[in-house]
Image: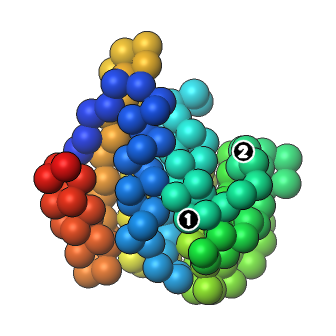
């Protein structure tokens, strides 16, 4: 499996990178976010949402599990942490194969429900504010997405 890595120095760089990625997202895209508590999954999600034109405040949907927002495409933000010891299917397929973009924090918890093709983004702490962000595309769509994104991102 191919992987792509970016190192960022602070939250602003993370947000900027996520906004740039959002410009390439299409209906049905699924992004699985992984990382420890406080690594920056929600900050990354906020950047994606902002880049997609979401005007509402995006925060972690910890108590509702799924939040839906309107932007240039529907934007579905899932935080499945509370499903850790549950086999509950909340109709994930409807989101994954719908008209919007789905971002899932703690995606490994619902691994059995995830689509075969998706983009996993892992965020690791490398310092107090610095992070290593690793993109792991699965499937032709996401491999192409990463190639295009990293070409544009590293060219600027």
Q: Which residue is mark 1?
A: 52
Asked if one can make out residue 3 in the rendered structure from this viewpoint, the answer is no
Q: Residue furthest top?
A: 128
Instruction: State the separation of the CA atoms marked 1 and 2.
Output: 17 Å
> Does 101 appear above or below 153?
below
- x%, y% of residue 23? 42, 67
The residue where tag 2 is placed is: 60
* Between 90 and 12, the one nearer to me in the picture: 12
Is disc 1 placed on a helix, strand or loop?
Answer: loop
* Residue at image location 85% in from the left, 47% down from the top: 63
Identity of the residue drawn at 30% across and 58% down: 136
- Decide: is 55 above or below 46: below
Q: Which mark, by number, is residue 108?
A: none
Rendering coords of residue 109 (x, y %): 60, 54
Element type where label 2 sits in the image: loop
Percent across and percent down for residue 38 are: 57, 28
Q: Is residue 64 visible?
A: yes
Q: Is residue 90 left or right of residue 132?
A: right
* Position above or below: 35 against 142: above
Residue 115 falls left or right of residue 125: right
């Amino acid at each position: 499996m191919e992987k792509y890595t970016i190192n960022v120095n602070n939250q602003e760089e993370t947000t900027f990178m996520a906004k740039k990625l959002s410009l390439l997202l299409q209906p049905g895209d699924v992004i699985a976010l992984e990382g420890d508590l406080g690594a920056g999954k929600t900050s990354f999600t906020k950047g994606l949402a902002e880049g997609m034109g979401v005007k509402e405040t995006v925060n972690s949907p910890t108590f509702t599990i799924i939040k839906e927002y309107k932007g240039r495409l529907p934007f579905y933000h899932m935080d499945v942490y509370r499903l850790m010891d549950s086999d509950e299917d909340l109709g994930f397929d409807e989101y994954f194969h719908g008209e919007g973009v789905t971002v899932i924090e703690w995606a490994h918890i619902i691994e059995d429900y995830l689509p075969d093709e998706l983009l996993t983004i892992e965020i690791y702490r490398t310092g107090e504010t610095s992070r290593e962000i690793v993109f792991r595309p699965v499937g032709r769509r996401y491999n192409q997405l990463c190639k295009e994104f990293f070409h544009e991102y590293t060219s600027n």
